[in-house]
Amino acid sequence: MADNHENNRPDGSDDDNGKDPFAEMFSNLFGGNLPGGMNPQDLPEDVQKQLGDLQNNPQAMQNMFRQMQQLMGAMASGESGPVNWSLAIDSARQAAAGDDPTVTGPRQQAVADAGRLAEMWLDQATAFDSAGTDFTAISRAQWVTKTMDTWKVLTSDVAQSMSEAMTRAMTDQAPEEMKSMLAGAQGMFQNLGGAMFGMQLGTAVGGLAKDVFGGTDIGLPLAGNSPVLVPANVSAFGEDLEAPEQEVLLFMVLREAAHIRLFARAPWLRGHVVSAIESYARGIHIDMSKIEESLRDIDPMNPESFQSQAIEGLFTPQHSDAQRSALEKLETALALIEGWVDQVVAEASANLPAAGALREMLRRRRATGGPAEQAFASLVGLELRPRRLRDASAFWAAMREERGVAGRDDIWSHPDLMPTSEDLDDPAGFTERRRLAEAADSEIDEALDKLLSGGFDEPDTGDSDGSAPEDPKA
């Protein structure tokens, strides 16, 4: 480090230890000075200014240290794979930390009581029985822990495809003379990608933990097969509403319980949604120009800019036709799930004064997604929200009118009965289209049975005595 560099503290006083603040910064980050004895004064003037301003902001510097140390530590840990899950969990917990009150006994009791009442009301609104499990009130940090196994299922294939695409793109675009060297560094690229993806995924999941009301907000049972509620988020949502807190709580509990009933009575549904995500993941393609653009826009003065740039473009894939088809399947499934829950809860909460207003607010929230949900969508390229929620709700209302409660719910009995996007466009024609499809399937099955059993009449090739048929022209 240069001897003529002035060593001053951020407050203007002399540094009694005689340490260069830049050297300290890099020592904290990497355990040593700048590589190759580089002098910070040799850096570009604007970078020196940014580093100087950064050392005057202890909180920003602390955040940068923590993020860089996490990233370097994760790479050094030897954890391999498309996602560094240790880093993902740590980042999620940090993002969810802060104002996260512990669930008290009285609050737990209030949620449990609301759960029992909600189950009674739902018995009158759906043919699906209760799953028979009590409600549990949890904190935001507990929500992260309970849902992480499901995030692994939802994002592993996406991360794997992105890791492969990113490594392939970097290798393909490198100069010929560097390709042999890069081939030996693929493991390092993969570990770096896994650490970066884990950090960003954790940040997104931690952000969601501050927004969600329970374990089924995105249309999947993230927290398992038992209903859960995050009272802190329910209370925050109800602060600006005129509705009594107890009504808001009961409405949220109704929605969570309805989701749990649906997935319990249609066990194939979860796999249907996950398969759409896997189909999407298999076609991941990375636009390297976006990566370069994102890196140019990172502001060294703002450590959070690394996260925002990564979320906004660094890992965003480009959609192929096959992926658009998978996303349409996913969005239709999520719309049908949310539309059914919307309709069932509307019936179950008919006597709740604030139900109409709460229903409309949640419709808008679910259809547009909050900031944390949008961040997750930008990260993995998946928008886990129902674009056609209102159409789906109208479809289930039409089925209720036409078939009754049991007939409506029976549509969930088999994946082959799953309504399509066309059915959302024309609910009135669903039954007739389904009848025609079933008739066509029946005819095909009948013909196949005849073919296999030899039931079809063989063509006449001659008389019974074995002679050739008489030529009518003879």
Image (cartoon, rainbow, N blue to C red):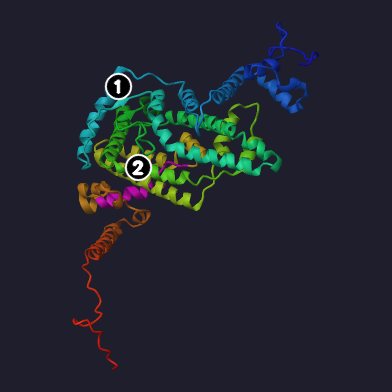
Please provide the residue range marked out in magenta: 382-399
In the figure, residue 437 lies in which quadrant? bottom left
**Mark earlier in primary sequence (2, 1):** 1
Q: Is residue 431 above or below residue 130?
A: below
Assess disc 1: are there few (<14), some (14-19) or many (≥20) residues with their C-alpha within 10 Å of its C-alpha.
some
Q: Secondary structure at mark 2?
A: helix
Residue 281 in percent (x, y) is at 47, 43
Pick out the residue farthest to the front: 466
Relative depth, front residue between 416 and 112? 416
Identify residue type, mark 1.
Gln
In the figure, residue 4 lies in which quadrant? top right
Assess disc 2: are there few (<14), some (14-19) or many (≥20) residues with their C-alpha within 10 Å of its C-alpha.
few
The residue positioned 57% from the left and 35% from the top of the image is 310
Marks 2/1: CA distance? Answer: 32 Å
Q: Within the magenta stretch, is there residue 405?
A: no
Identify residue type, mark 2.
Gly
Report whether residue 79 is seen. yes
Residue 116 in percent (x, y) is at 23, 29
- Left/right placement of residue 162 relative to residue 4 reads left
Residue 142 in percent (x, y) is at 38, 24
Q: Secondary structure at mark 1?
A: helix
Pick out the residue farthest to the bottom: 474
Query: Disc 1 designates what residue?
Result: 108
Q: Is residue 420 above or below residue 356?
A: below
- Left/right placement of residue 221 relative to residue 62 reads left
The residue positioned 24% from the left and 33% from the top of the image is 118
Report whether residue 244 is seen. no
Q: Is residue 349 above or below residue 59?
A: below
Query: Disc 2 designates what residue?
Result: 271
Q: Within the magenta stretch, is there residue 394?
A: yes
In the figure, residue 22 lies in which quadrant? top right
